[in-house]
Image (cartoon, rainbow, N blue to C red):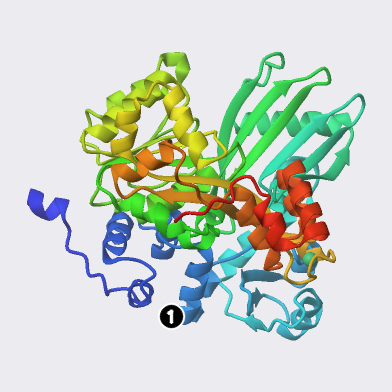
Amino acid sequence: MLTIAQAISPPLDLHRTSLGQYLLEKKLISPVQLHAALAEQQVTQERLGFILARDGFISRKTLLDAIIATNADQIHSEYVFSNIVPGELLLSTQTMVVAETDSVIYLATLGSEKQALVEFAPYYPGIPLVFVSANFEQMDNYLEDVRAMLQDDDSLVDKLLRKAFSDGVSDIHIVPRYNSYSVLCRHLGVRQLTHEGDLDEYNTLAARIKDLSRMDLAERRIPQDGSFQMEFNGKLVDLRVSSVPTTNSEYITIRLLDPDRVQPSLTGLGISRVDDWRKGLSRPEGINLICGPTGSGKTTTLSASIRELDRFGSSIFTLEDPVELRLPYIGQVNVNPAVGLDFARGIRAFMRTDPDVIIVGEIRDVETARNAIKAGETGHLVMGTLHTRSIHGAAQRLRDLDVPANELVYLLRSVLVQRLIRVICPKCKGARCPFCRDSGYSSRTIISECAYFPTDVEVSRMLAGERWWPSLLEDAIALCETGATDRKEVIRVFGEDAIVYFNNVDNFGHASALAKLPTIEKVN
Ligand SMILES: [Zn+2]
């Protein structure tokens, strides 16, 4: 019989798996993270790599690279539903796409390798194709799934979602009209029409999506919310669904929360003065703010920031509306006004649970602001988001929510203001190609304004209007000058201010145009 001590802390050998050892040596995970994943594996018996990726310790890409480096013959336990190769070809050649990386494609086939090589090569120009041994049962299941995806009706939702995942879509909009309906997908912040169908198809699709997300199928007169999860290429993906009754049936939106898209570290997000933000996070108490409008990437920055904290050594709670990205080992709470659980009450509840860090999804009312300040004053590190567009605006917003200036002075640590801007496609340099879905832009990066306040004196100087930082627009202009984005995109994001600036550049030159920007007074 096990003693309680033995049962609670089973001895774990961190070096027992080559995958774990490799990730440790490359410093891609910490011993504490590996220990936690191995402990979880003892209970669930799942694959170690799968657990590490699901818990957000490594990205799916890091996992594939690590498997290839340590146990390339184990790669057959992975698989992807490729959006590049048509399903018909997978079936006719009896082939499975095991893994797609930037430098090599792994395939397994029950048929002829030679034939598969000839047929697949055109889809992966310039990338070597490598065959690995196939596990018959897994191949069989994979091909069965491909077959199911190719059939219409039932798998319409499946096809739609898988295509959206492969394309990196963030939201799917299903828009009914008088006698047809459209599917529009948001990619890098901009919607594109991707499908048109008849109303019978719409009805099938809408019913299936509502069923999956546990909504009331019969109810079509009031807005509903729901969610479901789907496994896609070995990742568990959350899908959040909303329906709104319109004059033509229900308008349905699906938000895809791809865990890999939010994996980047703070360093990889493109925040110009990220070290100033980090300094605020490193303080044991006080308040740190992330600011920007909806859709400015605040959630991604927030979760990257949380991942840099010690999730095991510190007790971390988040209050969100709703929880978007699951972070294991953290207490994540959905606000639920219907039962009286709002932001203000949530913070009060957290204070009784021995927390170190409290994260408030949004500070938008007096009571929430007061409780967040109280948490910061009583030895907790608080992070929160605000819908403001500048550092001075953030301080003013808290003052508007009745936070006294003297408390702000002692508690404010760092403020980050951000927006997202599209980056020019590296393959076609903006000329539009299949890689960037004919948009000319391949990804998005953060433009930001950031300040760290080491002392109360610094906050006082900011409140007195004596301190300024390079603005969002200046950060975007700097990015534009490197060629990473273009004038058209800066104008799309900033409108008139950017037009005026670029006109000044053309008429009077750079230095003069910069001097005409409203917040040119620099720090120091
Ligand atoms: Zn391109």
Classify the position of the C terminus by image quarter: bottom left
Q: Give the residue drawn at x 58%, y 49%.
A: 471
Residue at the spot of label 1: 70
Q: Is residue 46 left or right of residue 511?
A: left
Looking at the image, residue 342 lies above or below residue 99: above
| Secondary structure of residue under mark 1 | helix
| Amino acid at circle 1 | Thr
Report which quarter residue 27 is drawn in.
Answer: bottom left
Residue 155 visible (yes or no): no
Q: Give the residue drawn at x 38%, y 76%.
A: 26
Q: Nearer the viewer, residue 429 or 12?
A: 429
Coordinates of residue 107 in the picture (x, y in percent): 65, 75
Report which quarter residue 228 is drawn in.
Answer: top right
Coordinates of residue 192 in the picture (x, y in percent): 81, 46
Q: Nearer the viewer, residue 238 or 450?
A: 450
Residue 189 visible (yes or no): yes
Coordinates of residue 191 in the picture (x, y in percent): 77, 44
